[in-house]
Amino acid sequence: MEYPFKPIATLNTCFKEKFGIPRQMNLVEKAPATLVFHPEFAREEAIRELSGFSHIWLIFVFHKAITKDWPVMVRPPRLGGNKKVGVFASRSPFRPNPVGMSAVRLKSVEITSQGAILHLRGVDILDKTPVVDIKPYLPYSDIIPHATGGFAPRPPDPGFHINFSDKALGQCAILEKEIPDLRSIITQVLENDPRPGYCAKNRDEPDKIYGIRLFDFDLKWVVINGSIQVICLDKKEDPS
């Protein structure tokens, strides 16, 4: 049987590569995105009354994780990358069908001559991700108060204090004229330590510079004195 699935929209986010994307939705609550409908679906009637909901579900495709061979077991970062669990007990993007879902904040709906654009916050999704459906988030049914979280029973504790070099502070001040809350976004991205789960979480690495492609700049940082030090925000042309 063939299923008539096709993308209805493209999600433009601040996360330009896999490294550095929050491991769950809303961990970086101000991480922005815009959802742009494809022409066939860019009809104002299709989103009538959607603006009355504070949050929406996005059902999307892990378009950079499509593979012929899906893993039966995976190593969740939450378990330090050292223990395997079944793929269906995880949120790994590498799945038999590379489908993801996230509940994100619907900040506003913009109506343009090309159709509606949804402005979102709290995304944990790669830039240019295809979206296959949108559904309103219903608090009375989507919140399950007594649910249990298995091996991830609570939000991760912030692992690091984030410091900014004088250079990085100056660059943030300039960029925040175009990107509101940039310093807060960077702090939330880094404080849960985006390094792979197998890294020694409390080990200083003053000689190793990490980089994350965020918005249209390269965020560079090191782990030193038990904290993350933001070195600079190098603005370069997007390599894509």
Image (tube, grey):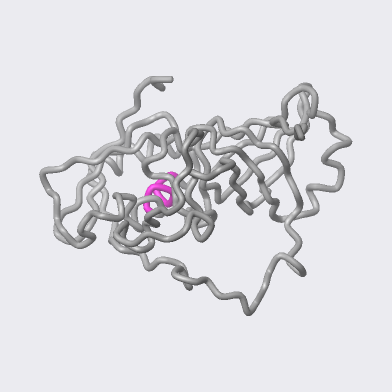
Residue at far bottom of view: 146
The residue shown at (33%, 33%) is: 218
User: Where's residue 221, x and y in %?
Assistant: 24, 44
> Relative to the observer, which residue lies in front, 178 or 65?
65
User: Where's residue 83, x and y in %?
Assistant: 33, 62
The residue shown at (62%, 51%) is: 104
Q: Could you tell me how many numbered marks the image carries?
A: 0
Residue at far front of view: 1
Q: Quadrant of residue 232?
A: top left
User: Does 184 appear in magenta?
Assistant: yes
Q: Is residue 51 above or below residue 84?
A: above
Q: Quadrant of the C terminus?
A: top left
> Relative to the observer, which residue lies in front, 146 or 155?
146
| Dominant secondary-structure state across the stretch colored magenta | helix
Task: Judge whether residue 151 can be spotted in this image.
Answer: yes
User: Where's residue 128, x and y in %?
Assistant: 55, 30
> Relative to the observer, which residue lies in front, 173 or 129?
129
User: Where's residue 116, x and y in %?
Assistant: 76, 32
The residue shown at (35%, 63%) is: 79
Q: Quadrant of the N terminus?
A: top right
Residue at far left of view: 207
Q: Quadrant of residue 6?
A: top right
User: Does 5 appear in magenta?
Assistant: no
Q: Which residues are magenta?
A: 182-187
